[in-house]
Image (cartoon, rainbow, N blue to C red):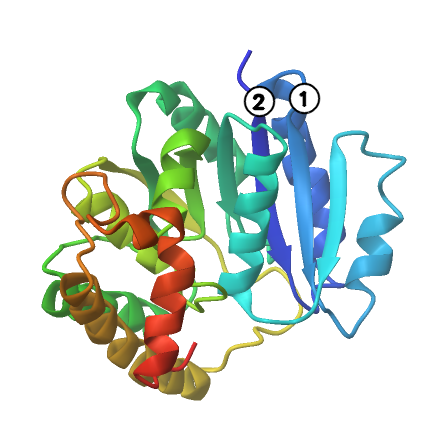
Amino acid sequence: MDKLYIIIPAYNEEETVAAAIAQWHPIAEQAGAGSRLVIIDDGSRDRTLKIASGLKKKYPRLTVLTKENQGHGAAVLYGYKYAIRKGADYVFQTDSDGQTLPSEFPVFWAHRKDGGLLIGCRTYRQDGLSRIFVTKTLRLVLLAAFHVWLKDANSPYRLMGCGQLQDVLRNVPKNFFLSNVLISVLYSKKNLGVSYYPISFLPRQGGKNSISIRKIFKIGLTSLWQFFALQKIWERHGYSMGTGRDTDSRELQAAPCKQLHKNMKKERIPL
């Protein structure tokens, strides 16, 4: 039976983390033996870690990890790599703010053998016009930077097979802030397949979003620079996005992510 790891990053989510665990733990139980619900505490300054850790006896499939605060992108990468190390067959990522529904997951699980990246396209959104605008703008940015059209590249509702994901992660720089976006781009560029399934997206169920619209705009400008720079670096250093191979260079094949990170630093691209 396939082993599923559900990855949920959490930063200052003391108001919502208990509900998220209660909602998603049954999915881990239903998925089969060895499946886990993994909460990644991203250096929270509130009671998030204490609350989540206190629920481990109640929820036997629950794993709680903590790390220094480095942002959402670094947290999900940490979770993906943890799941791969633990021998997961599939990894599913969502967030801890209660905006997504476990009831919509069975459709994704039923199509897991289709391969590629299965994304929940936020068709029924209740998170505000500003967030919808950000998603639409991101589509155009990715089209300009990478020549790919992705409906909802940053959706926090995605299922991936760990075999393909491990290969994709080799081209994602360490602690890249918009790592889910870059992963979506790589699945498309490598022709691994990207499938969309409509999902609901509710208002935040408690607490405050740690990223304001002003901060999103600032991150967007930095990310725009990063995206265009990454595309140039991939081309300049021989990264092949369409063949499933990272590069023709032996050095980069051995450690493409490390080399890419070094190249970004050399060209003063912020991570």
Task: State the image coordinates of residue 76 (x, y, percent, origin top left).
Answer: 53, 54
Question: Could you classify mark 2 by the number of other residues whose Cα lies within 10 Å: few (under 14), some (14-19), or many (20 or more)?
Answer: some
Residue 124 locus on image (x, y percent): 34, 51
Please, what is the three-letter code of the amino acid marked with disc 1? Gly
Q: Amino acid at mark 2?
A: Lys
Residue 167 x %, y %: 36, 40
Q: Is residue 4 visible?
A: yes
- Which numbered circle lies on residue 34? 1
Per the image, label 2 sits on a secondary structure element best described as loop
Residue at 44%, 24% in the rendered image = 109
Examine the image and state in which quarter residue 158 appears: top left
Q: Left of 188 or right of it: where is 10?
A: right
Image point (90%, 35%), residue name:
57
Residue 9 found in image quarter: bottom right
- Residue ranking furthest to the top: 1
* Residue under the image location 43 percent in, 65 percent down: 127
Tell me which numbered mark, 1 or 2, is placed earlier along the sequence. 2
Q: Which mark is residue 3?
A: 2
Measure how far apart labels 1 and 2 are at the Cα level: 6 Å
The image quadrant where one finds the N terminus is top right
Residue 125 in sight here? no
Q: Quadrant of residue 192?
A: top left
Q: Is residue 261 left or right of residue 1?
A: left
Contact between labelled residues 2 and 1, with CB atoms less than 8 Å apart: yes
